[in-house]
Amino acid sequence: WNHSALLVDAEGNMVEALGQVISNNISSYLDQDYFLVRVNANSVDAKQIANFANSVLNSKYSISILVSSFFTLLFGWKVVFGHVGSYICSGLVASALTRGDAIYPKPPEYMTPADLAIFYNVDPNKRENQ
């Protein structure tokens, strides 16, 4: 698992962190393998999730969180660091989904794409997740 993005409407528009937080469309991934994970969110939560994601457009990508996460995975560090208002792709998605009912086992900013896949029970061997 190496990337996460958040769909914000039925037309396939999404918000993702790539160098900075940008708006994109899922159609840009048609030639790539991906899993579309559906979460249960009522209309109020869905609006709050999308509003949060759209509110952080143009925020910086967090190299420091990425480095911190790497050392946490490599050495089992319990200390993490990063810049407030900056995101990695999966941290952006997890932070947005906490505007619904998602409660993660660690701070959302430090969730990795693999953490999200595990949390949402994505099985890479089952293509119907896609």
Image (tube, rainbow, N blue to C red):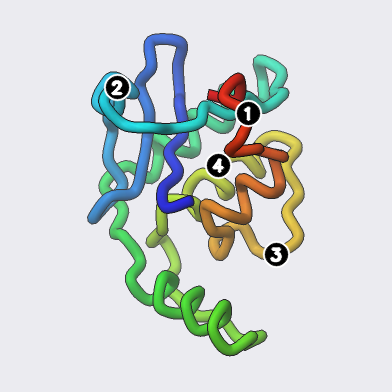
Q: CA distance from mark 3 to mark 4?
A: 14 Å
Among numbered discs 4 and 1, the one appearing first in the sequence: 4
Of residue 50 and residue 29, the one placed in the foreground of this image is 29
Name the residue beneath numbered marker 3: 106
> What residue is drawn where x is 26% and y is 47%?
58
Give the mark nearer the N terminus: 3 vs 4.
Answer: 4
| Residue situated in front as seen by the camera: 90 or 125 | 125
Point out the tag, 2 or 1, that comes first from the N-terminus: 2
Mark 4: which amino acid? Answer: Ala
Circle 2 crowding by C-alpha within 10 Å: few under 14, some 14–19, many from 20: few
User: How far apart are labels 2 and 1 at the CA level?
Assistant: 18 Å
Quickly name the residue at label 4: 96
Kindly identify the residue that appears in the image at 66 percent across and 85 percent down: 78
CA gap, disc 1 and disc 3: 27 Å
Are circles 2 and 4 on residues that touch, CB within 8 Å?
no
Q: Residue at x 47, y 77 (%)?
A: 70
